[in-house]
């Protein structure tokens, strides 16, 4: 099984760390994984994105032709990636930030108001973890435990509150319906 | 109604791509204003660097010729020798002018090339993501001086302007800053003076402009301006370093 | 682990304690890692030079002193290093030089490209010389080949170039670092300048005014290059056993090509992949052998056609060689490549 996912949004929306945590968790789950970020000029001010490929076999190309899943955090990302999703694929959409909806009929759409939920938790910046929780729950690509472990490893250098906050945001997204 | 604030003729109608609070935007504007006020737009050739200001040619509405990293003054030398009656200036970051291009800079000054170098000192490498620059202060944290710059390991912050003042070919050298309205006004005057020295054929002129890089200093714009006042200016004092138009000054 | 970090960590594990470089995107994470890691080691030295010219000359100095030394950069900076690399070759000094290639010519951009193939494999600077050029295609290989590069450099006293690209530098994949053991055939560096304590002074120089002696020096280098061509060819094959068509690609392009080959295999087309790992020495013999049974070749590179010339030299008139290139930092998808592969395949009615 080979699954391609693209995470995309504004530079400041934390899409690269979303992808990183997903990739890292997949690795802890014993899968093969590649994480390919957009970098440099593209990141400064513009939109950032990253491609994560996970597979049980060796991964040939880290570049995805037509991903199974696309996570979009802002309008430009939806415009850019709605047409590359595989037929039968899924778009995960941040409903707080995106007014438009994809027009294709052959894909599925899951929405979550990630910013609103994060705001309720007291810090809008953890919207990326809300979205990640939602994405993991719906796709079941990696185990919840692996993500929680990864969140601990990643955020513990920045203090306990950061770990708790990010875990909480992740669980909010996970439990959202 | 009298218009008190408008876009200089020498600036194109495009928004700057620089980060909020970045000194490059202010300095671009000053350069354009001076060139307009001196009526030099049509004889100006600018040389942008490799650095955050590499895209300066998108903003300035006069001739611009891109230089390889650090070679600006050498390239400008060629331009000026071929077109001696033009205003030729380089626009260079501290990495560009004081690290990779030090040799070119010193020898251009020493030849007394009749050009003006605008040297933007932001104490770091902006474009490549905040590495140590030759002007980075001792103890200053950058991505390649983690834990702070140490003189005996990483070298000391270089005073390029003072060094260049020692060359017989340099005519006018001044250090200014763009961290406050007063200093911005002084910077504008200094740029005008540098260009005037060039147009009078007196030799090499250089204006070092201490400029905030809030992004890589990891500060707000306000904090960055204060940091210039409290730290950078202490090491890099502002003022005229050499002026051949005034007898008895300089070294 | 990120590719640029992998290079740095691998170098340190291979015993490299000296790093000289100058910042340039997309490889800045390598010097940054080195700055942090080497400052923690008692014998570590990191210098951010004032330019690539200075950096490569620092590398020459370190190598003369007999230590393992590395520099890294990306295309424009590698151009500046060419003078120094020519001296390293002439002086027969070991060194490892990493090029995270980006789009060019000129300042170009910071996107991944393979446009420095000629520069790396033909020498790059002035004079008649070669570098060993290794082209990894994954983070794991970045680790293994960087470590191996130091050994090859020491064994043959030659500059070794790791030719990767911005994508490999920025990408993250799990990596297992192999244990590094110095190879047995490594002889002591009895040529290094260490101070003439109890022995006559040593000289390392490249100025040889007598043309006959300079010619002799050139032939000596040439014999070394022939030894390397015999012993150090590296490549990977993928599904070539029953193939009627062979794709040839290296580095990042080979990853994409592999994905494309998998796609066309699903359609029942008998296509395989040859991936040169050592770009110099180029796996010429393998191609010649392959040319005896495969008649259709397709070369894919992220440039305007450089390695394809080596493929043509190897195959001569045998075989039908097609090329597809995306220069300037564009990274095509496996789907795009698979479509071109199948159109060639079907047109030829294989
Ligand atoms: C030969 C070469 N080496 C490295 C680079 C990468 N590079 C681009 S700009 C820059 C330094 C920028 O710093 P500075 O000159 O201080 O200008 P700033 O961006 O801070 O305005 C570097 C190292 C390059 N373009 N060419
Ligand atoms: S990185 Fe620094 S110098 Fe560059 S545009 Fe941003 S604030 Fe200005």
Image (cartoon, helix red, strand yellow):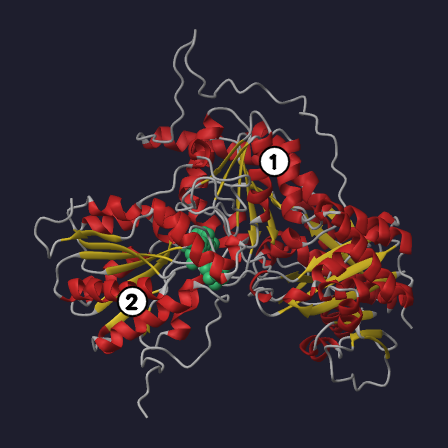
Asked where in the image residue B207 lies, by quadrant, the reply is: bottom left
Q: In the picture shown, does residue C268 fall above or below B213?
A: below
Return the chain for callout 1.
C
| Residue C336 vs residue A15, the one in the foreground | A15
Residue at horizontal 67 percent and vertical 58 percent from the top: C253
Left or right? Give the position of B181 relative to A85. Answer: left
Which residue extends farthest left?
A: B247
Left or right? Give the position of B54 relative to C317. Answer: left
Q: In the picture shown, does residue C191 fall above or below B12?
A: above
Return the chain for callout 2.
B
Residue at horizontal 64 percent and vertical 56 percent from the top: C167
Residue B185: assigned label? 2
Structural crowding at the residue carrying mark 1, measured as other residues with C-alpha within 10 Å and reported as few (<14), some (14–19) or many (≥20)? some
Residue C334: assigned label? none
Q: Position of residue B2 (x, y in %)?
A: 30, 89
Q: Position of residue C171 (x, y in %)?
A: 69, 54
Q: In the picture shown, does residue B71 fall above or below C219?
A: below
Q: Which residue is mark 1?
A: C37
Residue at horizontal 79 percent and vertical 68 percent from the top: A120
Does label 2 point to a residue whose CB lies under 8 Å from ligand 2?
A: no
Left or right? Give the position of C127 relative to A139. Answer: left
Structural crowding at the residue carrying mark 2, measured as other residues with C-alpha within 10 Å and reported as few (<14), some (14–19) or many (≥20)? some
Q: Position of residue C292 (x, y in %)?
A: 74, 53
Whether residue C232 is visible, yes or no, is no
Secondary element under disc 2, as helix, strand or loop, is helix
Whether residue C301 is visible, yes or no, is yes
Secondary element under disc 1, as helix, strand or loop, is helix
Q: In the picture shown, does residue A70 fall above or below A103?
A: above
Does label 1 point to a residue whose CB lies under 8 Å from ligand 1?
A: no
């Amino acid at each position: 099984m080979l699954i391609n996912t693209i995470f995309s949004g504004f530079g400041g929306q934390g899409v690269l760390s979303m992808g990183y945590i997903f990739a890292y968790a997949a690795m802890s789950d014993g899968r093969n994984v590649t994480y390919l970020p957009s970098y440099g000029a593209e990141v400064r001010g513009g939109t950032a994105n990253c491609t994560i490929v996970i597979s049980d076999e060796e991964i040939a190309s880290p570049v995805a032709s037509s991903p199974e899943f696309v996570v979009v955090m802002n309008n430009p990302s939806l415009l850019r990636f709605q047409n590359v999703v595989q037929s039968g694929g899924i778009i995960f959409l941040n409903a707080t930030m995106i007014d438009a909806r994809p027009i294709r009929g052959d894909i599925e759409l899951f929405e979550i108001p990630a910013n609103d939920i994060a705001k309720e938790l007291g810090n809008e910046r953890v919207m990326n973890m809300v979205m990640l929780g939602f994405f993991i729950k719906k796709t079941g690509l990696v185990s919840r435990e692996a993500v929680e472990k990864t969140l601990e490893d990643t955020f513990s250098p920045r203090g306990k509150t950061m770990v708790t906050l990010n875990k909480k945001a992740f669980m909010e997204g996970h439990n959202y319906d | 109604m009298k218009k008190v604030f408008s876009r200089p003729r020498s600036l194109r109608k495009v928004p700057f791509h620089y980060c909020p609070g970045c000194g490059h935007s202010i300095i671009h504007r000053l350069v354009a204003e001076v060139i307009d006020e001196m009526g030099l737009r049509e004889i100006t050739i600018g040389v942008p660097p490799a650095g955050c200001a590499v895209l300066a040619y998108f903003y300035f509405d006069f001739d611009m010729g891109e230089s390889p990293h650090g070679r600006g003054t050498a390239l400008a030398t060629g331009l000026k020798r071929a077109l001696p009656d033009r205003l030729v200036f380089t626009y260079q970051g501290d990495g560009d002018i004081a690290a990779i291009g030090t040799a070119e800079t010193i020898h251009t000054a020493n030849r007394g090339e009749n050009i003006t170098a605008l040297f933007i000192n932001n104490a770091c490498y902006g474009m490549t993501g905040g590495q140590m620059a030759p002007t980075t202060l001792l103890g200053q944290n950058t991505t390649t001086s983690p834990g702070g710059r140490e003189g005996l390991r990483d070298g000391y912050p270089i005073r390029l302007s003072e060094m260049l003042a020692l060359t017989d070919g340099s005519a006018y050298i001044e250090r200014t800053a763009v961290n406050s309205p007063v200093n911005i006004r002084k910077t504008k005057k200094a740029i005008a003076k540098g260009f005037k020295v060039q147009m009078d054929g007196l030799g090499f002129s250089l204006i070092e402009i201490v400029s905030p890089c809030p992004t890589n200093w990891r500060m707000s714009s306000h904090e960055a301006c204060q940091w210039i006042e409290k730290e950078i200016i202490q090491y890099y004092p502002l003022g005229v370093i050499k002026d051949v138009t005034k007898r008895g000054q300089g070294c | 682990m990120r590719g640029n970090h992998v290079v740095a960590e691998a170098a340190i594990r291979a015993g490299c304690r000296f790093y000289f470089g100058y910042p340039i995107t997309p490889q800045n994470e390598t010097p940054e890692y080195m700055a942090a890691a080497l400052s923690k080691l008692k014998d570590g030295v990191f210098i951010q030079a004032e330019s690539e010219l200075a950096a490569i000359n620092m590398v020459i100095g370190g190598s003369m002193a007999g230590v393992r030394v590395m520099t890294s950069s990306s295309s424009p900076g590698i151009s500046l290093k060419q003078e120094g690399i020519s001296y390293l070759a002439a002086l027969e000094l070991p060194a490892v030089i990493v090029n995270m290639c980006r789009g060019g010519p000129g300042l170009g951009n910071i996107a991944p490209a393979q446009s420095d193939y000629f520069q790396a494999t033909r020498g790059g600077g002035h004079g008649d010389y070669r570098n060993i050029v290794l082209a990894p295609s994954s983070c794991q290989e970045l680790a293994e080949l960087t470590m191996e590069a130091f050994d090859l450099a020491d064994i043959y006293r030659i500059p070794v170039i790791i030719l990767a690209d911005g994508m490999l530098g920025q990408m993250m994949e799990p990596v297992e670092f192999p244990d590094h053991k110095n190879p047995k055939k490594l002889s002591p560096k009895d040529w290094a300048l260490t101070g003439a304590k109890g022995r006559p002074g040593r000289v390392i120089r490249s100025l040889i005014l007598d043309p006959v002696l300079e010619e002799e020096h050139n032939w000596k280098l040439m014999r070394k290059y022939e030894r390397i061509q015999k012993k150090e060819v590296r490549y990977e094959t993928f599904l070539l056993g029953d193939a009627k068509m062979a794709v040839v690609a290296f580095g990042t392009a080979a990853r994409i090509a592999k994905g494309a080959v998998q796609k066309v295999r699903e359609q029942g087309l008998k296509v395989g992949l040859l991936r040169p790992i050592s770009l110099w020495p180029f796996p010429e013999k393998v191609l010649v052998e392959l040319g005896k049974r495969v008649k259709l070749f397709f070369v894919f590179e992220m440039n305007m056609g450089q390695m394809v010339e080596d493929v043509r030299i190897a195959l001569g008139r045998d075989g039908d060689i097609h090329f597809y290139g995306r220069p300037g930092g564009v990274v095509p998808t496996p789907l795009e490549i698979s479509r071109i592969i199948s159109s060639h395949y079907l047109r030829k009615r294989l």
